Structures are given as C-alpha cells and as structure tokens.
Image (cartoon, helix red, strand yellow):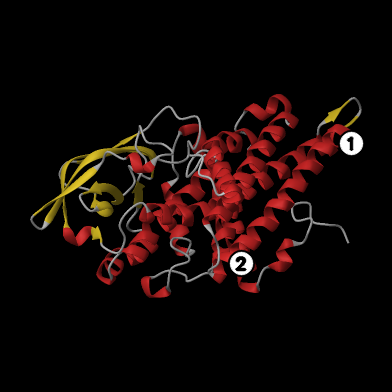
Amino acid sequence: MALHPYDLYDVRSLLTDEERAVQDTVARFTDERVIPIIGDAFDQGRFPRELVGEIAELGLLGSSLPEKYGCAGLNAVSYGLICQELERGDSGIRSFVSVQSSLCMYPIYAYGTEEQRMRWLPDMAAGKVIGCFGLTEAHGGSDPANMKTNARRDGDDWVLNGSKMWITNGNLADIAIVWAQTEDGIQGFVVEKGMAGFAAQEIKHKMSLRASVTSALFFDNVRVPEANRLPNVKGLKGPLGCLTQARYGITWGPIGAAIACLDEVLHYTKERILFDRPVAATQSAQIKMAEMARRITLAQLLVVQLGRLKDAGTMQPAQVSLAKWNNCRMAIDIARECRDLLGGAGITTEHGAIRHALNLESVITYEGTETVHQLVIGRELTGINAF
C-alpha cells in the first residue's frame, strides 16, 4: 500500500474519530472557500471578512471552550487540527481564529467573571463580536514587562493611556483585551469600540499577512468601567498564559502551510518538463522533496504528542516553545525551497509558496521570536536565564 505523501507515518491513525471529523470538515472549508479567493485577497491586502460567518457556523471560534458559552467544547488536538487546516489556506485566516479564540475568548473565560463570560463569549463564538489582543508595544517587542500603557483607578472607572502595536484584527475588533500597568501590577481590561479616546489605525504597506488586518491601538484617557476589568489575574502571568494558548495553535498551523507548498511542487514538478524529462524525475528535486516530507513528519509527531500533553493537563510552556521554534523553522524553510523549485513562476501569487513564505516571516516572529524560544529551551537545559 502506498504511503500518503503528506502523512508518511500515518499520524492520522493516532487521531480519534471526532478529531478526524474535525480535520475533514475544516479541510473541506479551506479547499472550497479559502483557497479559491485567498490569492486575490493577499494581492489586494484584504481580509476576507465574508468568511467569518461560515467560520463561526463551523464552531471554529473558541472551539476548546465549554458549550455553555456557545462554543464547541473540543479537545486540544482538535483545535490544533483546525489551525493546521486553516493555515494550509493562509496564515492570515488562522491568525484571525487564533486571536479570537486563544487571545480574546480564552482570557475572558480564564480570568473573567461569569457575568463577563456570558456577556461576551456567546456572541464571540457566533462571530457577532470580534476581538483583538493588546499586549505588544512599539518599543517593547520581546520584553512585554517594559510596557508603558497604564491604567489608574478613578472612582468606579479606570483611565487608560498608552498605545499598542502589531495588533491582529485591530480595525475589525468590537472589543480589545488590553494589558496595562497599574499600581497593583499588570492587569487586563476589555476596551469596547466606541469608548471615547480609543482609536485603531490599520498598518499598511505590509509584505506579510496581507490577508489579515494589523493595527496600532491608541488610548487617550479612555474611561473603562470596573465591570470591564478581568479580575482573576494580575501580573505578566495573565498575558503570557494567553500567549501559551495561542502559541500552541501556532505549532500546528505552519504544518498546514508546509503541506500546501509541498503539494504544489509535487504536482508542478511532475508536469514541468526540462531537458526531456519531468523536474520530479531529477535526483536534486526528489532529495529536496524527501527532506520536506521528513521535516513535516517530525513536526506532525511533535504536535500530536504536545496536544495529548495539553489535553492531559501536563503541557509545559517550554514544550510549546520547542514546537513553535521547530515547526515555524520547518515551514519557512520548506516554503522558500518550494518557491525555488517553482522557478520564475514561484514569485507570483498564482502559486502559494511565495505567499506562505512571506506570511511565515511574521509567524516565525510573532508570539516569541525563534531566538526567544531557543533561549527558553536553553534556560530549561541549563537552569540559567540568558534573556
């Protein structure tokens, strides 16, 4: 029996029936609804907002949260498969779902009150309320503790001042989960669109994640009621806990991008004739594609085990760092190599490799650069913090 070219170790056999059903459903959505339009959306620098309703109907927003809040209640492996199949279409689509689910719905669920959960989560699961996550600042980067955004108590309100940068969904968002310095440490606030002094400005001229909205957020004496403060966490533990959730999904997503690139070059090199034979018949092309398959297989095995650890409640942040580092590096290397195998045709968005390669320049950077994750593993090995 021939091996599946994108699943040489039959990783799919390690999945439950429900997990396979989730993967098949999202794969079909990606094939039928995302891939036909995403090249044009990337060219136009446009997020395909028309897909949000369908994404919500499939239960992909906050998919791991309880059904009580209108969510699907799926396990971690299912969420990972959602990310993988969406990013097979485009990193921008997966980023939208990742931010909505892991960076906005999760903190409301984990750090909010029951009243806050019931107020926002059902509408967020239905795609009626879109969120964004405000942690990164222009000067901060990999040092989130160095934030300047601050909130001070004023009667029954908080007054918020500062700015955030590189915020996915910023101009789409109805609410922003904003982290700010207070007299009692870093705290989280739900800032609503339309609050006086709150503004979002879309970042243009991007060459990466062009089918995604990226913004800067500004807060000029924004009055936020106490009812919008997330009361159940203080300090960096709050935003870093959200990032661990999102990074977990990112460990799966790039596998989808890599598979899309490999699929494309497998077909192209069989059809492209040079020197009287298909490019796929050359040793150099086969060695390159075999290397891609090897690295994809290792990444697939890595994330399935990571997902099982997460579902068992034993996953550690350093394990997420290792998988994010490995799988983003794997995917960006494969995308670049595939672009090369496509020759001159590879520089246009009629093919996916250049689009995936450009997107992965962001994915390998955001939510912890490759260097940051290497240092996380170095600290785990040596017990010495080199940050």
**Of all residues shown, which one is farthest toward the left?**
155
- Name the foreground residue: 270 vs 261: 261
1 or 2: mark nearer the eye: 2
Q: In this picture, is 330 found above or below 56?
A: above
Mark 2 = which residue? 308
Q: Position of residue 28 (x, y in %)?
A: 61, 58
Observer-nearest of 349 and 102: 102
- Left or right relative to 48: residue 24: right
Q: Residues within 10 Å of mark 2 (few under 14, many from 20)?
A: some
Determine the residue positioned at 42% across, 72% down: 66
Q: Residue furthest bottom?
A: 68
Q: Residue at x 73, y 67 (%)?
A: 13
Q: Does dot 1 land on a helix, a strand or a loop? A: helix
Residue located 80% across and 37% down the image:
288
Judging by the rendered image, the residue that carries numbered circle 1 is: 281
Q: Amino acid at mark 1?
A: Ala
Q: Is label 2 in a helix, a strand or a loop?
A: helix
**What is the number of the mark on residue 166?**
none
Residue 336 horizontal side relative to residue 224, left or right: right
